[in-house]
Image: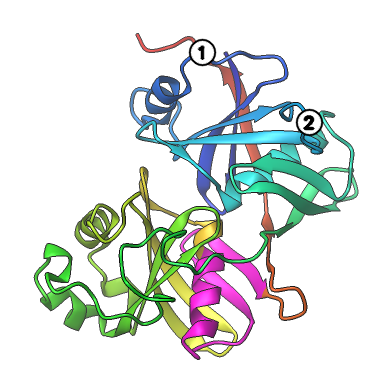
Amino acid sequence: MRFTKMHGLGNDYVYVNGFVEAVDDPPRVAREVSDRHFGIGGDGLILILPPEAGIEADVRMRMFNADGSEGEMCGNGVRCVAKFAWDHGLARSNPMRVQTGRGVLSLALQLDNDDKVRLVTVDMDKPILDPASVPVALPSDRVVDHPLPEDGFGLDARWQQDCGLCGGMTAVSMGNPHVVLFCERVDRVPLEHVGPAIERHATFPKRTNVHFAQVIGRGEVRMRTWERGSGITLACGTGACAVCVAGVLTGRTDRSALVHLPGGDLRIEWRESDGHVYMTGPATEVFSGDWVGPT
């Protein structure tokens, strides 16, 4: 299997050109190639495919987490899909239309002097705030700064004091589920313990991506992420969008914010004119090779 390793701010995936390659068992392949010791290494597997019949799009993206579970959407991944499709001649539309589990998204490409994609602005559509659609199992019209579960996610409450947890939790879907918690010191969050406990808590029927955000100013936020099915990652594009939406809903930030992630920065805007969230960031191709399978 021919593959290409790409990343968006260090959120790295193994990409396969599904126009010429067939992957019969994507969940198994995702688990094998994602292993950073015995595989290629990555946060998961992304297939770049022809769009389904009747869908007006240039390419289609399917993404699988490192544990083999299929995700509905990946913000960093979709930017890389657009870069691969343009740079390798699969599609030459700008804006490019990419079919995802969220629907067909429009991506505006910024090119360098060599006609390669440098930055991508993704129209991420409107955030989903209805609890049943996120989904989050809470009887509320919206889950905004909602108190934490009575069991504290089954964790010792000291972690909340250590990181300076501010208020409750906010649930947002960007086609995939997210929960955002604001705190004073994201560097003090024991993410390796707190992340999996929240991800799999009964409050989230389909599990959830977990984000801790620290407000630096009205237009600037720092965040860390535990991704559903992959663990701690250097960046999460849909998560950065969710953090921006949560910041506006809770009155902590403006509608446009520079979001600092461990792997780099994203510019996020929740545009008032159409209610859509726009994400701008880089996409990087690292190397290509041939995967022969586990030995």
Amino acid type, label 2 = Gly
Work out which quarter of the rendered image holds the N terminus and state it. Answer: top right
Above or below — where is 234 with respect to 242?
above
Residue 246, position as x, y percentages in the image: 48, 77
| Above or below, 96 relative to 20 | below
**In the image shown, does 50 or 220 lie closer to the viewer?**
50
The answer, for residue 8, to whether it is visible in the render is no
Percent from the top left, x then y, of residue 96?
A: 82, 45
Q: Residues within 10 Å of mark 1 (few under 14, many from 20)?
A: few
Which stretch is magenta?
Answer: 240-269
The residue to which callout 1 is attached is 24
Q: What color scheme is it?
A: rainbow
Residue found 65% across the figure and 70% down from its top: 267
The answer to whether any part of residue 201 appears in the image is yes
Provide residue 270's location: percent of width, then percent of height. Answer: 65, 75
What residue is pinned by disc 2?
A: 54
Q: State whether residue 65 is above or below residue 153.
A: above
Q: Is residue 4 left or right of residue 58?
A: left
Residue pushed farthest left? 156
Quadrant position of residue 290: top right
Amino acid of disc 1:
Asp
Who is closer to the viewer here, 245 or 113?
A: 245
**Disc 1 on helix, strand or loop?**
loop
- What is the count of numbered marks? 2
Of the 4 image quadrants, the one containing the C terminus is: top left
